[in-house]
Structures are given as C-alpha cells and as structure tokens.
C-alpha cells in the first residue's frame, strides 16, 4: 500500500488515519495548496490497512434506509452580549456552557497567536470564547482525536464542534469506544479554504497597513448580520473592514478557487448528518420567519439524534426558539457540494508562477480595470439601466 488515498478528493484531512496507525507510520504533510494529507513511512508500515478502514470518506455509503428528518429550529441566545459575540445566534455558546457546567471540555476551531486556525481544547468559559465565530480556513486538528479519546475514557464529557467531515472522522476514530459522554456538533459547511492562501491574505494586509494583524473576524456584525463583512484588527490599534483588500478573501472563498478538493465531493451535504446537532446561520429567515429576524443573528439548529435532542432541551432556558422545517431552512450546502470553479487549476498555476498579488488582482477583482467595471455596473444597476446596457451589448 503506497498511500491512504488514491486521489486528493478522497481525503478530507481529518487525521483519523494518522492516529489509528498502530506503528505511528503516518504523518500529516502540507501539499503545494496548503492542505494537510497523510504520508506513510513505508519503512514503518506493516500494511494492516487500519488507515484505509478508518477513513470515513472512503467507507461505503450506508445501504440502510435514511435516518428520520431532523427537527429544525431557529434560535437566538437570550443574552444579547453572547449573540453579538457570535457569528449567528449564539447556539454554540449555549451548548458549550452546558458541557462546561458539567465539568466537561469543549473542542473547536480558534485563532492562535499568529492567527493560524487550529482546534483547541477549552475547559473554562474564557477559553471557550476563543472558539466562537466562523473561521473560513481549514483548521489544524493536531492531536485532538487522541486527546478526546483519553478524556472520554477518564469519564469527562466532551463537546466537539467542527466541519461534517471532521465530526465523521472523529466518530470513525472512536468506533468501539464508549461515546456516551461525547456530543458531536457539526456545521453546514460551504467548504474548507486553503491555509496557505489565508496566510497570504494576512501578510498582504499587514504589508499594506504596516502593522501586525492581531485579531480577525471572518463575519463581523458591524453592518448587521445579513452581510458578510470581514474585519481585521492590527497591533497599532487600527482596524479595517472597509477596504477592498480587507474584503478580498471572501471573494476567493465564494469563487470556489481555493477549497480543498474533497469539498467538491463532500458526502455530508444533506440532512443525513453524522453529528448529534448541526448549527449554521439561518439564511432565508427574513422570508420564512420574518417576525423573528432582527438582523442581529439567528442560528439554524438541526437536532439529529436523541442525544442531540436531550442537549437541546437542556439549554432551552437560555434561548428564544421558533420551530421551522427542512423546506424552509434549505441551503445549497444541504443539497449538494460546492461546485469547483472552472478556473481553479489556472488559479493555482498562476499563484505558483506569479504570486498572490497577481491572483488577487485577476481573481478577486482588485485590478484597477476590474474595480472600474464593478463600480460602473453597480451604478447602472442602481439607476435601473444595467439590463438595458447588457441588451444593447448583446449580453442580455
């Protein structure tokens, strides 16, 4: 056996294979797109195939009838300070407070001191607060899986929050172990962007502002919840959420140019979840539950299992909730994987050949001509003339 996977699309980077290896023959190595993949030391490998067997991405899809549809809720935390500090409605804080209050431990994605995205362990509310908020970068799980296994064996409760593939990987790694104390919470995931491009984005901002970035909000609420506003804070006390450069990362993200290849083949873009609970932004609530939407953030919560139901009922006192349906909360990433951009391969070729500034100018719309065209288009649209101009140009 030469590799854990045959194609990059077969691997989500969850680290289960690394930690299940009985002879520690597997390390995670970064490829030229910045993503971690398992690498086998053939001198140590005993060809036991444990790495293949634990891989949730390569296991056959279950042939049993699908599980029942989840219960669906719109949720807002009752503490407005909590909601303001959260990307959406504060459901993660409520769940983590529940587990922490029982003496448990919470694992989730956080920014480290260099603004790398890593999964960290939190045993107090102050430590947990670092885990709040969306991070549009694939997190480094490091040794989270064996640490969680050890905590569960010691009798501690654990809440693990991550992408669907990460929760599936953890569940596969813990197969055969008592998981009574584990609460799995995944997110409705658009895809995991490259840590390499994330680092380039920060470096570009630091260079232009001549100060080190010390804090970042991938989804700040300075202009309300419905918008997607990136906000970076610098060591000199300044912050930026207005410049095109500060907003450029999301352009690349939504263009699907830098997502992990496995994201385009994701097995978890449906209501059949591997977690106890699923949380997300409740997009579309302004149409389905308009009286509940105040533009300050509302969480979508899918209750997938009896354990998830028990946890949801236990935190009800902290929340304002409304019952919804799978039809009213349907989002693209609950229907199909994010489709790869036609120019994805060209983007990476240009990045490696010409650098980050080149791809930023050519793929995120930051070149002067692209800025001019965008401004002209927005101006015509505001005047109601955009369709007419397109028709005259033969593009309508």
Image (spheres, rainbow, N blue to C red):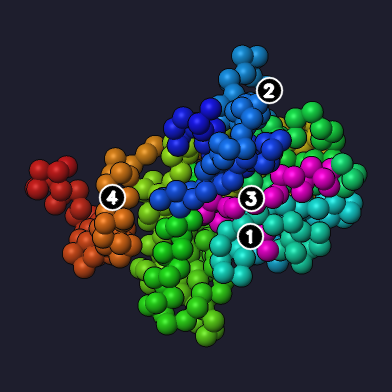
Q: Which of the two residues, 125 or 21, is positioned nearer the viewer here?
A: 21
Q: Which residue is mark 1?
A: 110
The image shows residue 76, relative to residue 153, as above or below, that is below
Q: Is residue 88 visible?
A: no
Q: Considering the numbered disc 1 on the image, is that residue within a helix, a strand or a loop?
A: strand
Q: Nearer the viewer, mark 4 or mark 2?
A: 4
Q: Which residue is mark 4?
A: 349
Looking at the image, do the residues carrying marks 1 and 4 touch, with CB atoms under 8 Å apart? no
53 lies left or right of 252: right
Q: Considering the numbered disc 3 on the image, is that residue within a helix, a strand or a loop?
A: loop
Question: How far apart in space, not on screen, are marks 1 and 4 (Cα)?
Answer: 30 Å
Q: Is residue 32 visible?
A: yes
Q: Nearer the viewer, mark 1 or mark 3?
A: 3
Q: Nearer the viewer, mark 1 or mark 4?
A: 4
| Image location (x, y in percent) of residue 273 | 64, 31
Q: Which of the two residues, 76 or 215, is positioned nearer the viewer here?
A: 215
Q: Residues within 10 Å of mark 2 (few under 14, many from 20)?
A: few
Q: Mark 3 or mark 2: name the one nearer the start of the chain.
A: 2
Residue for point 10% across, 43% down: 394
Q: Is residue 117 magenta?
A: no
Question: How far apart in space, not on screen, are marks 4 and 2 (Cα)?
Answer: 44 Å
Q: Nearer the viewer, mark 1 or mark 2?
A: 1
Q: From this viewpoint, which residue is outermost toward the front?
A: 43
- The answer to which quarter of the image holds residue 181 is top right
Q: Mark 4 or mark 2: name the one nearer the start of the chain.
A: 2
Q: Which residue is mark 3?
A: 141
Q: Which residue is mark 2?
A: 68
Question: How far apart in space, not on screen, are marks 3 and 2 (Cα)?
Answer: 30 Å
Q: Residues within 10 Å of mark 1 (few under 14, many from 20)?
A: many
Point out the stretch of residues depicted in magenta.
130-152
């Amino acid at each position: 056996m030469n590799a854990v996977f045959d194609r990059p699309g077969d691997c989500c980077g969850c680290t289960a294979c690394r930690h299940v290896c009985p002879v520690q023959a597997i390390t995670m190595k970064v490829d030229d797109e910045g993503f971690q993949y398992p690498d086998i030391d053939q001198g140590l490998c005993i060809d036991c195939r444990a790495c293949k067997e634990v891989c949730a991405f390569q296991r056959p899809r279950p042939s049993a009838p699908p599980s029942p549809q989840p219960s669906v809720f719109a949720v807002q935390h009752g503490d407005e300070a909590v909601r303001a500090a959260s990307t959406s409605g504060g459901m993660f804080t409520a769940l983590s407070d529940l587990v922490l209050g029982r003496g448990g431990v919470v694992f989730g994605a956080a920014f480290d001191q260099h603004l790398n995205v890593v999964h960290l362990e939190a045993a107090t509310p102050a430590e947990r607060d670092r885990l709040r908020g969306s991070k549009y970068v694939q997190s480094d799980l490091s040794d989270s899986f064996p640490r969680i296994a050890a905590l569960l064996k010691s009798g501690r409760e654990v809440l693990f929050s991550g992408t669907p593939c990460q929760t599936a990987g953890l569940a596969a790694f813990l197969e055969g172990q008592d998981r009574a104390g584990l609460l799995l919470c995944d997110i409705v995931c658009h895809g995991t962007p490259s840590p390499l491009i994330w680092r380039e984005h920060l470096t570009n901002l630091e260079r232009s502002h001549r100060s080190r970035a010390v804090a970042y909000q991938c989804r700040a609420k300075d202009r309300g919840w419905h918008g997607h506003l990136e906000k970076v804070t610098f060591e000199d006390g300044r912050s930026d959420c207005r410049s095109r450069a500060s907003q450029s990362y999301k352009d690349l993200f939504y263009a699907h140019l830098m997502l992990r290849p496995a994201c385009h083949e994701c097995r978890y873009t449906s209501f059949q979840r591997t977690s106890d609970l699923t949380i997300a932004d409740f997009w579309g609530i302004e149409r389905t539950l308009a009286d509940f939407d105040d533009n300050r953030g509302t969480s979508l919560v899918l209750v997938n299992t009896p354990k998830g139901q028990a946890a949801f009922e236990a935190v009800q006192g902290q929340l304002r909730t409304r019952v919804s349906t799978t039809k009213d909360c349907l989002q693209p990433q609950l229907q199909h994987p994010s489709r790869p951009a036609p120019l994805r391969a060209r983007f990476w070729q240009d990045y490696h050949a010409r650098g980050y500034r080149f791809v930023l100018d050519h793929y995120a719309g930051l070149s002067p001509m692209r800025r001019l065209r965008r401004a002209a288009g927005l101006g015509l649209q505001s005047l109601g003339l955009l369709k007419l101009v397109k028709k005259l140009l033969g593009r309508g």
